[in-house]
Amino acid sequence: PLLPVSTSVFKDDEGHDWDEIMARFISKRRFNRILRMVKRYSRKKYNLNKDNCTDFGLVVAAIAGIKIRDTKGTWPLGGGNNPADAGQSVREGKIEYLDSDLLFVYPPPEGKEP
């Protein structure tokens, strides 16, 4: 939090013991929009408060037609979108589908079986 800005880096996180998945089929047009967005984010400065990993995921989700509500939290000297609040919102089903395509979420939101 003392130095919230740094160079952006995309990393492989396959070493983690956990996965959260939200997936849906998308059109080639949306896929290409996501690829263009990834290139733009690779040149952006990382900012813990306004351009962090959760912000990246929320932009990708929006392009895919998914909106997640209540993703913001606070921390010492700042605040913004963060993985804990975003993940909890997904678990609680605070998701809006911006079109009628099917969505796959694993693990499923609390109280909803796959």
Image (tube, rainbow, N blue to C red):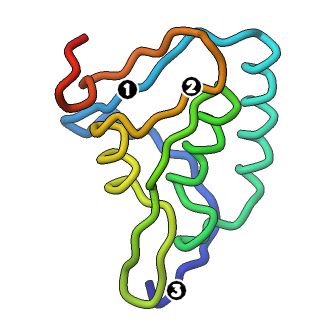
Disc 3 target residue: 3
Mark 3 or mark 1, which is nearer the start of the sequence?
3
> Compared to 49, does 16 lie above or below?
above
Disc 1 target residue: 21
Q: Indicate left or right for 83 with 79 as reference.
A: left
Q: Is 26 in front, or is 39?
A: 26
Q: How far, Cα to Cα, is label 3 from label 2?
A: 35 Å
Residue drawn at 55 percent across, 60 percent down:
52
The secondary element bearing badge 3 is classed as loop
Disc 2 target residue: 97
Q: Indicate left or right for 23 with 19 as reference.
A: right
Q: Amino acid at mark 1?
A: Ile
| Dot 1 alpha-carbon crowd within 10 angstroms: few under 14, some 14 to 19, many 20 or more | few
Residue drawn at 32 percent across, 32 percent down:
20
The secondary element bearing badge 1 is classed as strand
Residue drawn at 60 percent across, 73 percent down:
6
